[in-house]
Amino acid sequence: MFKKRQKAGGWWSRNKRGQEYNGTDSADTGSEENCPEQGTSGVTAAGGASFCPEEAERKSAAGGKAVEAEARADMPGTGEPHAAGTMEAGTRIGETEKRAGETASGPAYNMPEEMRKPATGDDMVMQARTLAGRGDYRESLSVLQKVREVRELMYGPDSLETAIVFDEMASVYERLGEPKQAEKLCEEALRTYERLLGEEHPDTAAGYNNLAGIYTAQQRYEEAVELYRKALEIYQRTLGETDRNTAAVYNNLAGVHMEQGGYEQAERMLRKTLSLREKMKDADQMETVTIYSNLAVVCEKRGKYREAEVLGRKVLQIRERAFGDIHPDTADSCSNLAIVCREQGKDQEAEAFFQKALTAYEKIFGPNHPDTQAVCGELAALSESRGEE
């Protein structure tokens, strides 16, 4: 009998750099004003945090490629993460990324012409994020490796510019099911942040958060909690309680509690995260979708199957419209919803959702990836429980 498993829709949120904090787009607040349909199909969490699925869907459709690219860049993890589908929380190395083509000195020999242009390296990092967001992880790594080689040549292996690329590569390796490689790169990046920025800098806090996510994936929970709490304290002191980075760490801590069986505590922390996001000016709807996905997982674990199913179906609907069927976030949602259906005795629906998840995982990751193998195990267990050969 295979062990029952449920993906958390990208539990841990990878905090990325190369973006500015403090967005000012009030259209992303997810507030009730933006959702005239809230009374009929919106979801309200205990604690008052509201989410408008129709608004998220409209933004995905009306925003076209820009919104889709933003949502894809927000993956783990996440995660999540990733984390799966992963909520991102931008931190401030935007200025460092700009310097990476403007004030660089050092040898430029044997460098492709396009890599000598001031901002091309940054463009390639964004290209790699988009590729990873589509599930093209090997291609994303190939692009990031090129940027790494150039930045190590121009700035050295211990520079902030190179550390940013290490963090990006760690994110992709983690999603590919290669945690040791991800851990090595993440630790290298963190050492650079601590040395050049100090332990109280938000970017260093992001490094703690990201390494904690990798520890969580390896079931190193005590180490993960220690780093998450360290990141949380830094964010609270430097950015405040209602910053999206702070909320992301609450989400991640909820994931650790869930993995350890602390479902009630995980649910409280997720609802706190949703409450904080309601107060944010720069809250992103697709990030909120990830938190509701995580909440659906916890509800299933606590036996709240009806709430878990309602949340899970809405999350799946939004992700299918935003990303399509062959996408890690969509596959995670199918797998999660399959388990909720199975727990309610809806075996045919469960099988159909597992099959959809399996098709996506096989196309994205191949047959030997842990996610693919896990869904195969779920299908085998379902057949066994029905007395099938």
Image (cartoon, helix red, strand yellow):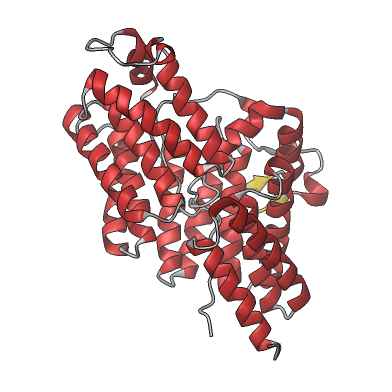
Q: Quadrant of residue 332?
A: bottom right
Relative to 202, residue 320 above or below: below
Front one among 371 and 99 = 371
Front one among 115 and 252 = 115
Q: Position of residue 350 (x, y in %)?
A: 71, 72
Q: Position of residue 65 (x, y in %)?
A: 68, 28
Q: Position of residue 67 (x, y in %)?
A: 65, 30
Front one among 107 and 353 = 107
Left or right of 306 on screen, residue 195: left
Q: Residue at x 34, y 31 (%)?
A: 164
Q: Quadrant of residue 117?
A: top left
Toward the front, the furthest residue is 110
Toward the bottom, the furthest residue is 387
Front one among 89 and 104 = 104
Q: Position of residue 301 (x, y in %)?
A: 56, 72
Relative to 100, residue 270 above or below: below
Does residue 372 appear in the picture of this structure? yes
Left or right of 342 on screen, residue 256: left
Does residue 202 appear in the picture of this structure? no
The tally of labels here is 0
Q: Residue at x 47, y 62 (%)?
A: 266
Q: Residue at x 38, y 39 (%)?
A: 169
Q: Residue at x 51, y 53 (%)?
A: 10
Q: Quadrant of the C terminus?
A: bottom right
Left or right of 56 on screen, residue 74: left
